[in-house]
Amino acid sequence: MKLEKITLYHLQMPLVAPFTTSFGSIDTRECILLEVIAEGVVGWGECVADRDPGYAYETVGTAWHILSDFLIPPLFGQEIKDAPDLQRQMSHVKGHQMAKAGIEMAVWDLTGKMQGISARELLGGYRKKVDVGVSIGIQENPSQLLSVVENYLTDGYQRVKLKIKPGRDVADTKAVRDSFPDLRLQVDANSAYVLENADMLKPLDEMSL
């Protein structure tokens, strides 16, 4: 395929409720959507870089710059066989994997549409459905956390990931596990711990995460 046009869209989406992690709290999510046209077919990709560089060095601003000035221009008019070939053609840019992934996602979408098959089939997947999960930010207290988890389970979510940080980890997780013993549960600290914190996290091993 030859890429004919790539349009970037900077989205700012208000959240239903503030989302709190070890980095802080946000009420708006930002990302970049990429509309890629090849041979008259439209593919869509998403760059998941955040507004701030707390989690990774890539941000919406840096990704827009890298995409606009370095990744996209050399791709026009070039024959792209598949996603691995696309990665080879972007290898002149070091790092910036989120920006690259946005274009790659669109190429997977284009490939599937051109072949008339789903991304699941392209990637060798065999399940037609997956259980939907939800990531829950740090709440004011364990009681409120349990209420939020219960509401999501009522909505049909079957997997839950809890955001944790030092001081808001074991007790919160135990409260959820005790109330929902069969729930598929995981925790995510967004790099809030160092090796010296290992002992304080050991109780999590008993919670069937």
Image: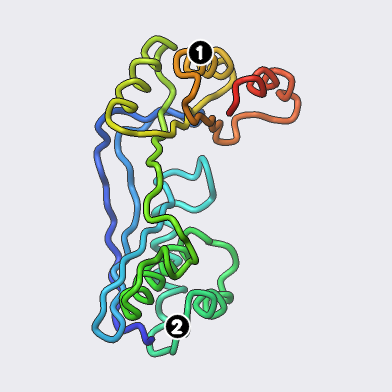
Spot occupied by residue 108 in the image (x, y as percentages of width and height): 41, 70
Tell which tag, 2 or 1, sits nearer the viewer: 1
Spot occupied by residue 7 in the image (x, y as percentages of width and height): 28, 70
Please, what secondary structure does the residue beneath circle 2 have?
helix
In the rendered image, which residue does mark 1 sit on?
Answer: 178
In the rendered image, which residue does mark 2 sit on?
Answer: 74
Above or below, 82 against 160 in this view is: below
Mark 2: give few (<14), some (14-19) or many (20+) Cα within 10 Å. Answer: few
Three-letter amino acid code at disc 1? Asp
Spot occupied by residue 52 in the image (x, y as percentages of width and height): 44, 43
Mark 1: give few (<14), some (14-19) or many (20+) Cα within 10 Å. Answer: few
Residue, x 53% and y 47% (percent of image)? 56
Residue, x 35% and y 72% (percent of image)? 117
Spot occupied by residue 173 in the image (x, y as percentages of width and height): 53, 19
**Quick one: 116 or 65, which is closer to the camera?**
116
Residue 157: quarter of image: top left
